Image (cartoon, rainbow, N blue to C red):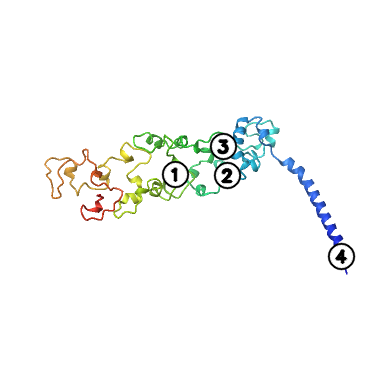
Amino acid sequence: MVSRASVAGARILALAASALLLFIGNAAIAPQSALAQAPGPEVCAGCHEGQVNYYKNSVHGQKGNLRGPSNAGECSTCHGDGTEHVKAGGGKGVGGMKNPGGKSASMSNEDKSAICLTCHAGGSKRTHWVGSTHETRGNACTSCHTMHTNDKVLVKLTQPEVCFACHKQQRVEVQRMSRHPILEGKVVCSDCHNPHGSIGKALMKRDSVVETCYQCHAEKRGPFVHAHDPVTEDCSICHNPHGTVADTMLKLRPPFLCHQCHTPHGGQIAQARGQPGQAANITGKSGVNYTQGRGCVNCHTQIHGGNNPGLLPTPQFMFR
């Protein structure tokens, strides 16, 4: 039989051997880690002082941000290993450096975005980036965002400037009389649109235009007993949210807007044209020119939908 002393001795020998192997392994790995470690911000600051200072004060440089570059290789996380770059004395692109924020053709937009998506791929806001309008038209994350200077996209007052660089028509529309307070920084593009992609029309944050508008205009949601079809279909049938010259951001002033769908009062075209000699008809409507200073909502007040339970006046005609 094997004695207890022999078993204990074998265990001690095994532990000693494991400790020796662990020590040898660490000794072999340590020099490799030291050699493989890329230059950090202290080295980069020799030439890129401004960028490094901003980085240290940004969310990317916070040590408490466990998902950020400060805990995953610092500058090399986005720019690659700068060892050869430093040895060569610097220079644009020297040593295989990556510059996702630059306009150089050495990196494709897909590769630039891939660097950002290494950390920013998660979350519902970027789920639909691949295949989105902006992605398929050759935009990268750095087409809009900046990392080493103040990112205008993240500030409400300056965000529209970034969007207007491409969306010229919207830049004109927000200068009109009737508009959302975009220039004042109270409403911004990202309140309604998700630039990283969505399943809604025109990159809407919600699945449809109306659902997006209902985020602020909840009183228009209903449900109503008597619904107006455009309200449940698409608010932009009547409104231009970026700005118009008509009240309440209507595309045209009433009754011209309403006449795009509705024949004025059962086909009284003569009255609509202002032709003289049109006497009052059986409904009591006179031959007044409906288009001159008249608005449909003077009578049809519940244009977004109503709950009138009475028979008169006819409730489906959006009377109060």
Q: Residue 236, how many percent across, how many down?
A: 35, 45
Other-residue count near label 1 (Cα within 10 Å), few / some / many at <14 / 14–19 / ≥20:
some
Placement of 265 over or under 176, stated as above or below = below
Residue that carries the numbered disc 2 in the rendered image: 114
Callout 3 amino acid: Met
Which residue is painted at 35% across and 48% down in the image? Answer: 219
Which residue is the site of mark 1?
193
Q: Is residue 241 left or right of residue 320?
A: right
Task: Give the residue number, with chain letter if any, for mark 3.
Answer: 147
Is residue 120 left or right of 16 when viewed as pictured? left
Helix, strand, or loop for circle 4?
A: helix
Q: Which of labels 2 and 3 is toward the front? A: 3
Please tell me whether mark 1 sits on a helix, a strand or a loop. loop
Q: CA distance from mark 3 to mark 4?
A: 66 Å
At label 2, the amino acid type is Ala
Instruction: Tell me which label, 1 or 4, sits earlier in the chain.
Output: 4
The residue where tag 4 is placed is 4
Separation of marks 2 and 1 at Cα, in angstroms: 22 Å
